Image (tube, grey):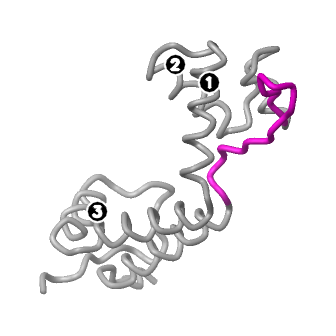
């Protein structure tokens, strides 16, 4: 196993380029990134988030609000961050509901669920705990 990456116990706000590069290299040399990907994918699937995003993308296309992949992605990104896009379908969704063609309404939340974020945080921490050595700069 390659040596661990040493980081100061009180790093600056962002990692220095050489530390960032060392961390990425170390992560790439192990199965850590694949493990993170698998954890996040399983968590997204279990939460139903992937289905919600797919359903919302279909709604955007069927409603005529979006016509291209780029437009769908831009709308989904805005909605996932809770940004209103005015009095459009996306704006109404960001406020909590979407009216379906049959007159009913369906709430679709495309924000990444907190459970997925928490699982991702834990997985990243575990991956880093395996490769990072904290140096006491006392």
Q: Residue at x 57, y 30 (%)?
A: 58
- Say which of 99 and 13 sits in front: 99
- Which of labels 3 and 2 is toward the front? 2
Percent of width and height locating residue 113: 66, 58
- Say which of 49 and 86 sits in front: 49
Q: Residue at x 64, y 30 (%)?
A: 78
Residue 12 position (above or below residue 58): below
Q: Residue 83 appears in which quarter of the rendering?
A: top right
Q: Residue at x 19, y 75 (%)?
A: 30
Examine the structure image and report whether residue 109 is included in the region drawn in magenta.
yes
Examine the structure image and report whether residue 72 is included in the region drawn in magenta.
no
- Mark number, residue 71: 2
Instruction: Please give the range of residues in magenta.
Output: 97-113
Residue 20 position (above or below residue 4): above
10 Å neighbourhood of mark 3: few (<14), some, or many (≥20)? some
Badge 1 is on which residue? 60
SS of the residue at dot 1? helix
SS of the residue at dot 2? helix
């Amino acid at each position: 196993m390659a040596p661990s990456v040493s980081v100061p116990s009180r790093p600056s706000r962002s990692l220095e380029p050489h530390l960032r590069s060392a961390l990425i290299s170390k992560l790439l040399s192990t199965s850590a990134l694949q493990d993170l990907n698998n954890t996040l994918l399983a968590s997204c699937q279990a939460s139903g988030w992937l289905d919600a995003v797919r359903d919302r993308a279909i709604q955007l296309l069927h409603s005529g609000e979006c016509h291209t992949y780029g437009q769908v992605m831009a709308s989904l990104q805005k909605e996932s961050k809770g940004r209103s896009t005015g009095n459009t379908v996306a704006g109404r969704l960001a406020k909590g509901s979407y009216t379906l063609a049959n007159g009913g309404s369906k709430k679709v939340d495309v924000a990444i669920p907190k459970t997925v974020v928490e699982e991702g945080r834990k997985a990243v921490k575990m991956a880093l705990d395996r490769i990072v050595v904290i140096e006491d700069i006392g």
